[in-house]
Image (cartoon, grey):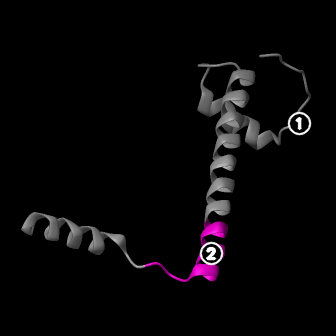
Amino acid sequence: MENESVTISFPVNLLEQIKEIKKDQKSLNEFVIETLTKEVQRYKIVSAQQTILKLRAEVEKRTGIHPDPVILIRELRESNENE
């Protein structure tokens, strides 16, 4: 992966908290990259969930609420067992 250098200004209290959390286990750079990678992934998940909810609402508006298929599946299984 290619890297690009940037300059970031942190509030002093946030930088102190980060230093306390990382406790010399990683460099500040590694910590920031790992944290931002997780945050980007979380953002993508939230965005996908919002898209799914929006599509569900559109389908429900267009087709109405669908009945629970579990009941139908159980009835079909029972009728197949009785045959």
Would you name the residue on which mark 1 appears?
9
Quarter location, residue 10: top right
Q: How many C-alpha atoms fall within 10 Å of the one at disc 2: few (<14), some, or many (≥20)?
A: some
- Of circles 1 and 2, the one toward us is 2
Magenta stretch encompasses residue 62: yes
In front of the other: 67 or 16: 67
Magenta region: 53-66
Residue 26 placed where, x, y %? 64, 19
The quarter of the rendered structure image containing the N terminus is top right
Above or below, 59 relative to 41: below
Instruction: Kindly report the secondary structure that dominates the magenta region of the rendered protein.
Output: helix
Please state which amino acid type lies under the numbered disc 1. Ser
Q: Is residue 16 left or right of residue 76?
A: right
Residue 11, position in %: x, y? 83, 42
Residue 57 marker: 2
Tell me the quarter of the picture where residue 5 sits. Answer: top right
Disc number for residue 26: none
Q: CA distance from mark 1 to mark 2?
A: 42 Å
Image coordinates for residue 4, horizontal then vertical, percent:
89, 21
Q: Position of residue 74 (x, y in %)?
A: 22, 69
Q: Amino acid at mark 2?
A: Ala
Residue sticking out furthest to the left: 82
